[in-house]
Image (cartoon, grey):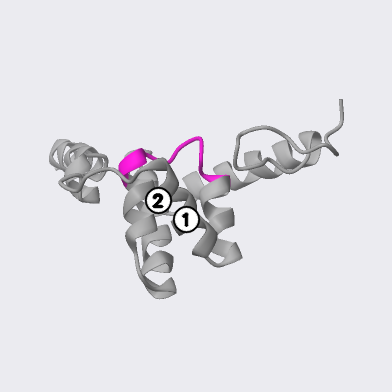
């Protein structure tokens, strides 16, 4: 029983990270198209993209940017974290809590991280 559960968990984790799950059939967005779509997002969704920039896959980012409503984006965000929890072998939002804690540490120690991956001018040296 435990072995079956372990195999099933591994299978689900593998499927969670396959491009199939993110509509990889579509052509990637151009850099200018990405910028344009990001500029139209509400602040909370732009901040999500900034915060997860180190771990979001290109196909995930493009899928997120193609969504048309805030409700779709909110559902995507929940699924984004759920996929990572399952891959980490948890279902209790542990991955997200750990990531958020590390992100807050970085922001506190080095300033707000910009979308370009550099720190702000108010960063401590």
User: Residue at horizontal 44%, vertical 58%?
Assistant: 37
> Could you say which is closer to the camera, residue 47 or residue 15?
47
**Is any part of residue 92 visible from this angle?**
yes
Q: Is residue 91 left or right of residue 27?
A: right
Residue 48 lies within the magenta run = no
Q: Find the distance from the CA under tag 2 to the CA under tag 1.
A: 5 Å
Q: Could you classify mark 2 by the number of other residues whose Cα lies within 10 Å: few (under 14), some (14-19), or many (20 or more)?
A: few
User: Residue at horizontal 54%, vertical 59%?
Assistant: 39
Tell me: residue 91, above or below residue 6.
below
Extent of the magenta region: 51-59
- Residue under label 2, please give it: 33
Residue 84 occupies quadrant: top left
Circle 2 sits in a helix, a strand or a loop, which is it?
helix
| Total labels drawn | 2
Looking at the magenta stretch, what is its main secondary structure?
A: loop
Q: Position of residue 77 (x, y in %)?
A: 42, 59
Residue 110 occupies quadrant: top right
Residue 36 image label: 1
Q: Position of residue 114 (x, y in %)?
A: 66, 42
């Amino acid at each position: 029983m435990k072995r079956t559960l372990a195999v099933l968990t591994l299978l689900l984790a593998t499927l969670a990270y396959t491009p199939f799950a993110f509509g990889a059939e579509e052509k990637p967005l151009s850099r200018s198209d990405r910028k344009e779509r990001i500029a139209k997002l509400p602040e909370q969704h732009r901040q999500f993209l900034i915060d997860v920039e180190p771990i979001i896959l290109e196909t995930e980012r493009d899928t997120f940017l193609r969504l048309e409503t805030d409700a779709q984006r909110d559902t995507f965000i929940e699924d984004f974290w759920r996929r990572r929890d399952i891959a980490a072998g948890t279902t209790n939002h542990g991955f997200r809590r750990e990531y958020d804690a590390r992100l807050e540490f970085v922001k506190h120690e080095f300033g707000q991280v910009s979308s370009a991956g550099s720190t702000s001018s108010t960063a401590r040296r």
